[in-house]
Amino acid sequence: MGGGGAAYPVAEELYQKPDPLGLECPNIHYVLSAKRDTHTESDLITYTLAGEKHSGRLFCGSDAPYGRMTWNFGGYRAMFNSLINGKNHTDLRVRNNQYLFTDGIAARYMGGNLAAFMIEAYKRILERT
C-alpha cells in the first residue's frame, strides 16, 4: 500500500491509489510498513470496517533497516491504543463505532494475520507435493 517518505507531488496519489484494490481483489495482501501514519491508520479503519475477510489481508511490518523495528512496532502499539479508545478518537468512523478495535483485532494486525497467511501458504505448497 503505497510507500513512505516520498517528497514529490505525485506521492499522495501513489499512497491512496492502491488502497481500494485490496477491498476489490481478495488475492491482494498488504504489508503496512514504510507509509505515513495517517494513511496507515486510515487503511486500518477502512479494512476493519469492511470486515474480517478484508482486514485479515493487512499485516503490520517494519521498514527496517530504514527505521528501527522497535520504533515501528512501538508506533503501531500507540496507534492501536488510540483506536481501541474509540470514544476519544479523532476519526468519526472510529468514534461512531467505539468498539471497532479491540486487543484481539490489534493482535491480528500485529502478527496474527501474517501468521495465518503463512500457514495457508505452506498448506498450499504441501498439497502440491
Image: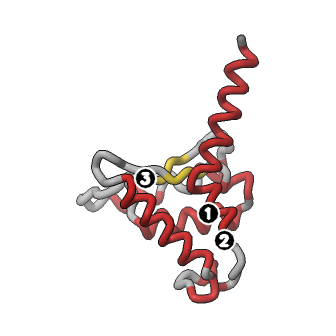
Q: Nearer the viewer, residue 117 or 15?
A: 117
Q: Against 69, is 83 above or below?
A: below
Residue 16 image offset from top left, x and y in percent: 46, 59
* SS at mark 3 in the image: loop
Residue 50 image offset from top left, x and y in percent: 70, 62
Q: At 70% from the left edge and 33% from the top edge, which residue is drawn?
A: 120
Mark 2 crowd level (few <14, some 14–19, many ≥20, 10 Å Cα): many
In primary-sequence order, the first of circles 1 and 3 is 3
* SS at mark 1 in the image: helix
In primary-sequence order, the first of circles 3 and 2 is 3
Say which amino acid is labelled 2: Phe
**Residue 33, disc:** 3
Measure the C-alpha gap from mark 1 to mark 3: 16 Å
Residue sitting farthest toward the top:
129
Give the labeled residue for mark 1.
106
Q: At 60% from the left edge and 44% from the top edge, which residue is drawn?
A: 114
Say which amino acid is labelled 1: Ala
Q: At 50% from the left edge and 66% from the top edge, which residue is drawn?
A: 77
Q: Evaluate whether residue 5 shows in this view.
A: yes
Q: Quadrant of the C terminus?
A: top right
Q: Is residue 5 left or right of residue 50?
A: left
Measure the C-alpha gap from mark 3 to mark 2: 20 Å
Q: Which of 77 and 50 is in front in this view?
A: 77
Q: Evaluate whether residue 2 shows in this view.
A: no
**Residue 40, disc:** none
Are the residues flagged by discs 2 and 1 in contact, CB closer than 8 Å?
A: yes
**Residue 101, disc:** 2
